[in-house]
Image: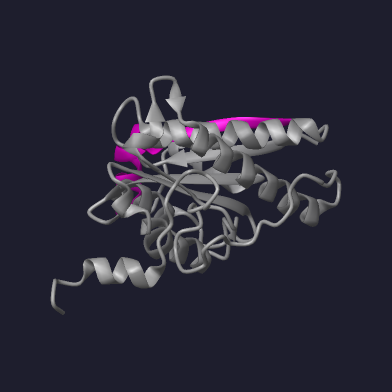
């Protein structure tokens, strides 16, 4: 049976780096599923196109037909990729508003990939302190690897090789999650160890992907005023 892979991106600009990142992750997952003989369809949903309808739903409690189709797509997805830009040290209001109109049971047990974009890598922890608690509350099956992209991670031809590698790794984890759920997918001998690289820091920080990972204590020390 074909799998549904859905991306929801909370970016406000067009083109959106959040949407671009979500598409890259989604394509990696679809490719990994295809390699096991499982068909998959990728659906990239840009929430900015439904901003007014999301607001009306919050005010009235009723979804328009267009918005209901988006909600249905998320509800029926086999895999969800959730991507938000970092605004004021947190997720975008549009992204949070969409999650607020979902039935709390919608994401229960669903494999979810968390990803975020920002202008600087100083916002890399936003996934862990802003996104993860929400999806944990909704009892989603959050993948161990998260993907963070700063502006410098995007090149002229799209996202850089380091992000491609992170997308490949999270695709492995999605495959294992789906295999555990229905037992119909083949295993992946190339996966190896998918445990968190740095439990106290956002799991995007792989010491082998060319990005620098600092211990949490070092990050705190850098935030303290001099002499304190």
Which quarter of the figure is the N terminus placed in? top right
Q: What stretch is highlighted in magenta?
A: 39-60
- Which SS type dominates the magenta stretch? helix
Q: Quadrant of residue 222?
A: bottom left
Q: 13 or 29: which is nearer to us? A: 29
Q: Is residue 40 left or right of residue 11?
A: right
- Image x and y of residue 17, in percent: 37, 33
Q: Give the residue drawn at x 78%, y 31%.
A: 35
Q: Quadrant of residue 220?
A: bottom left
Mark count: 0
Whether residue 69 is visible, yes or no, is no
Q: Is residue 61 left or right of residue 223?
A: right
Q: 178 or 156: which is nearer to us? A: 156
Q: 58 or 108: which is nearer to us? A: 108
Q: Does the magenta stretch include residue 75?
A: no
- Image x and y of residue 34, in percent: 76, 30
Q: Is residue 73 left or right of residue 45?
A: right
- Image x and y of residue 117, in percent: 37, 43
- Depicted 133 relative to depicted 153: above or below: below
- Depicted 97 relative to depicted 195: above or below: above
As drawn, which residue projects farthest toward the top?
157
Q: Give the residue drawn at x 58%, y 48%.
A: 75
Which quarter of the figure is the C terminus placed in? bottom left
- Depicted 113 relative to depicted 1: above or below: below
Q: In this view, does 45 lie to the left or right of 113?
A: left
Q: In which quarter of the image is residue 193?
A: bottom right
Q: Give the residue drawn at x 50%, y 38%.
A: 162
- Image x and y of residue 38, in percent: 79, 34
Q: Give the residue drawn at x 29%, y 53%.
A: 122
Report the colour scheme: one colour
Q: Does the magenta stretch include residue 41?
A: yes
């Amino acid at each position: 049976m074909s799998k549904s892979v859905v991306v929801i991106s909370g970016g406000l600009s067009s083109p959106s780096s959040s949407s671009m990142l979500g598409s890259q992750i989604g394509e990696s997952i679809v490719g990994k599923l295809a390699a096991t003989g499982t068909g998959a369809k990728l659906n990239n949903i840009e929430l900015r196109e439904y901003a007014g309808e999301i607001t009306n739903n919050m005010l009235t409690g009723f979804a328009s037909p267009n918005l209901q189709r988006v909600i249905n797509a998320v509800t029926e997805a086999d895999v969800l990729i959730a991507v938000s830009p970092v605004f004021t040290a947190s997720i975008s209001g549009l992204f949070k508003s969409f999650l607020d109109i979902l039935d709390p049971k919608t994401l229960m047990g669903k494999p979810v990939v968390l990803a975020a974009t920002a202008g600087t890598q100083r916002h890399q922890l936003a996934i862990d302190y802003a996104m993860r608690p929400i999806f944990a509350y909704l009892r989603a099956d959050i993948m161990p690897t998260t993907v963070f992209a700063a502006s410098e991670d995007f090149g002229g031809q799209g996202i850089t090789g380091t992000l491609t590698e992170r997308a490949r790794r999270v695709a492995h984890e999605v495959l294992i999650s789906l295999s555990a759920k229905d037992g119909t997918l083949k295993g992946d001998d190339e996966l190896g160890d998918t445990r968190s690289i740095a439990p106290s820091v956002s799991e995007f920080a792989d010491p082998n992907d060319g990005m620098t990972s600092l211990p949490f204590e070092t990050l705190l020390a850098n935030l303290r005023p001099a002499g304190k």
